[in-house]
Structures are given as structure tokens and as C-alpha cells.
Image (cartoon, helix red, strand yellow):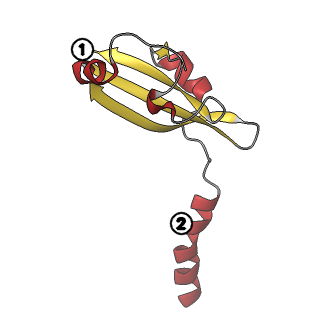
Amino acid sequence: MLRIALFASLLPAAVMAQAPQCWITYEGFHDHVQHIDLEMCPGNAPTAEEGFCRAAIAGDTLTIYVFRHTQPANAACLTQVLRQDLNSFIASRGVTFSKP
């Protein structure tokens, strides 16, 4: 009985260790989510070498999807989703963009 309980307690750790490192890849995202490509991420995080950002506008909400290059094979993985009121985003960043 003790052996079964010990095995059961270790099972979740073993399952978690085998879990995929990237739940949503850019490849899967690109085909299923309407979006626009951003020249750079807000605040330049991540940098172009580290990853990239995509954006979607729904009503008055701007959603920014942050992807980072991961190992192995340098796949792009969704790591963060940021939402902001579109008017606040424009007010804080202006209506024009100059790539540094």
C-alpha cells in the first residue's frame, strides 16, 4: 500500500517533466489568430534577437502577443499576452512610430 501511495505521489512530477516546453507555437498561432506584425515589441522587450510581438485589435482593446525564441530548434513560443485600452496605448506611445 505504501508503495502505491509513493508511486502515485511521484506520478504528477513525472508527467510534468514530460510536458511540452511550448504550449502555443507561433506556427499554430499564425494560422488561427487574426493579428498584425509589429516592427518591434513595446519597450523593445523582447529584442528582435530574443523574439517578436504580434498585435490584435478588438473594439477598444489592444492585445499584444509576445513570442520568444526557445530551444531546441529556435522555435517561437508564446510567453506573454498583454492587454491595454487602445486609447491609452496610443496616448502613451503617440500615433507615429520611428524604428530606432
Disc 1 crowd, CA 10 A, few/some/many (<14, 14-19, 20+) = few
Q: Residue at position x 58%, y 33% from top? A: 47
Residue placed furthest toward the top: 96
Q: Residue at position x 59%, y 60% from top? A: 15
Return the residue nearer the eye: 85 or 4: 85
Disc 1 marks which amino acid? Answer: Gly
Return the residue nearer the eye: 24 or 1: 24
Return the residue nearer the eye: 10 or 57: 57
> Label 2 belongs to which residue?
12
> In the rendered view, would you say 23 is above or below 55?
below
Residue placed furthest toward the bottom: 2
State the image coordinates of residue 54 (x, y, percent, origin top left).
Answer: 49, 22
> In the rendered view, would you say 84 is above or below 3?
above
- Please give the label number shown on residue 59: 1
Drawn side of residue 11 relative to residue 82, left or right: right
Mark 1, secondary structure of its residue: loop
Quadrant of res 57: top left
Q: Residue at position x 41%, y 35% from top? A: 81
Drawn side of residue 66 relative to residue 3, left or right: left
Between disc 1 and disc 2, whose residue precedes?
Answer: 2
Disc 2 marks which amino acid? Answer: Pro
**Can the viewer see residue 1 in this picture?**
no
Drawn side of residue 16 relative to residue 84, left or right: right
State the image coordinates of residue 73 (x, y, percent, origin top left).
Answer: 76, 37
* Label 1 vs label 2, nearer the camera: 1
Q: Residue at position x 65%, y 56% from top? A: 18
**Can the viewer see residue 18 in this picture?**
yes
